[in-house]
Image (tube, grey):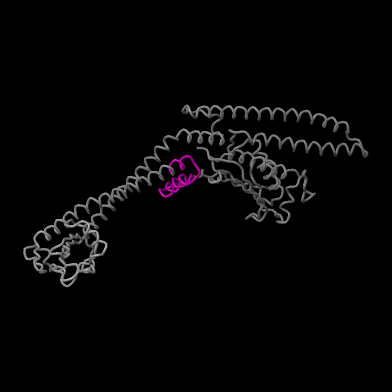
Amino acid sequence: MSEAPLEPPRRGPADNLQRIWSRLTANSLVGRLIRLAAVWFIFALFVTGIGLTAYFYRVTMHRFEAGVGQFADNLFSVTNIEDGVVDTTRFVDARSGIFHSGLYWQVARIDDKGDVVTPATSRSLWNARLLLPSRVLAEARTKAATSVFYDGMGPGGEPLRVAVIYSKVDSEDYVFMAAEDSSPVNRDVRTFGLLTGAALLLLALGSLGAIYVQVRIGLRPLFDLTDEIASVQKGQQLRLTKTYPAEITPVAHQLNGFLDYAQEVVERQRMHVGNLAHALKTPLSVLLTSAGDGEGLLPETVRKQTETMRAQVDHHLRRARAAARSTAMGERTPVEPVFDELAIMLEQVFQDKGVVIDWRAPENLAFRGEKQDLQEIAGNLLENACIWCKRKVRILAEFDPDAQILIMAIEDDGPGLDEARFDEVLKRGARLDESVPGSGLGLSIVDELVRAYGGRLLFETASLGGLRVRVSLPGNLET
């Protein structure tokens, strides 16, 4: 009995983004190149954004100061001071006549202490005054009749850009001050900075995306090489067949040479194992024949020890063959036909008991190893389940895409096994019930084979009431 093949999990946009992010943060060539490019690119754009914003602020403020300075020059030119009386009637400006309009002027005398006294102010200041820091006054004195600029605070708390012109009139010190609200300038600079930052951010994201695509395309041959090696490991091909750039071609040739050498070593090991089996089994058969059916201590001892030696030789030769096969690449065995063959055979062997074997496996599930080893692993476990079951045996196989392994679960409806004795059954020659025929090597052989393939063997209590044996082995889904 088989079930429909398992469908590969579907990936959504979030999974794709997660995969890309994992590649960027992982210790990989793509991640390194992207991170290096990102650090330099973001730093360059950050410096560029700051530089452009600073330059825009400088140019804008220079133009703004030119207007404020012209306002101060006009005030200085038309103001008449005679006998300590300041006359600004000839200075006309509509905005400075509006309450807190943002455009202000002030003319004042400076006493011997450096304080501003008897100032004449614009109507827009109302009862407020423009403050004059001492450092600005000192600078203005060194630049008489020339505008000196500083940042001040308006009557409404708004930022001001103030122009100060110092002059001596009738041996008295006077300052001519003009100021204008600089909030629009600051607002324009902030807007420019935000727009520039947004534009540079979009440029950075687009450029990083282009760099990612460029790196992926540039390193595509390496990814193809990785995919081909994975295909060889899964048994889908025996050699690397694609054409690679000049920088990678030597690596591909070396890998093909290694694959050829590994295959040659495996074949040589198989030949030596076969020769050893033949060389050992023949003398053992002679010893067993020589002992014959004779009675006595010596013939009985020879027969018993010869059988033990034969079982041990078979066990170790089988283990050597499995170790050789597990290191070879390219072997692949479909699981479904093996289950079907074993189920039919064992149901016939145990037909007097009425054993029913229910098996299920995806049609495209394959074991990355030789058919003989899968038959021995599944066959020993199924035979053991048939021996101990009441009537029903079940074997299920599934694929774990994350670990790239196939998992077999064999269970029966027999008496089961105490958890304290799970480890005991794996000992060579261990027999939990001497009334049941067998050498006690079945589960030990399975354990050796599974370990040779890098898998695991676990015992659990089955849902049917008996024992469940879970086996993990290298596997893949055929495409």
Q: Which x, y percent locates residue 405? A: 58, 44
Compared across the picture, whether 130 is left or right of 50 comes to left
Residue at 20 percent across and 56 percent down: it is 143
Region of the chain picked out in magenta, as a range? 7-34
Q: Quadrant of the N terminus?
A: top right
Q: Is residue 324 above or below residue 43?
A: above
Q: Quadrant of residue 76?
A: bottom left
Residue at 89 percent across and 35 percent down: it is 293
Residue reaching furthest right?
296
Task: Work out whether residue 253 or residue 82 is closer to the camera in this orientation and state it.
Answer: 82
Compared across the picture, whether 469 is left or right of 315 comes to left
Task: Work out whether residue 251 or residue 258 is closer to the camera in this orientation and state it.
Answer: 251
Task: Work out whether residue 463 or residue 188 is closer to the camera in this orientation and state it.
Answer: 188
Q: Which x, y percent locates residue 149? A: 22, 58
Q: Which x, y percent locates residue 101? A: 15, 65
Examine the residues drawn in magenta and state their main secondary structure: helix
- Picture mark count: 0
Q: Is residue 439 magenta?
A: no
Task: Work out whether residue 263 or residue 22 is closer to the camera in this orientation and state it.
Answer: 22
Compared across the picture, whether 1 is left or right of 458 comes to left
Residue reaching furthest bottom?
127
Q: Is residue 27 magenta?
A: yes
Residue reaching furthest front?
171
Q: Which x, y percent locates residue 237? A: 54, 31
Q: Quadrant of residue 404?
A: top right
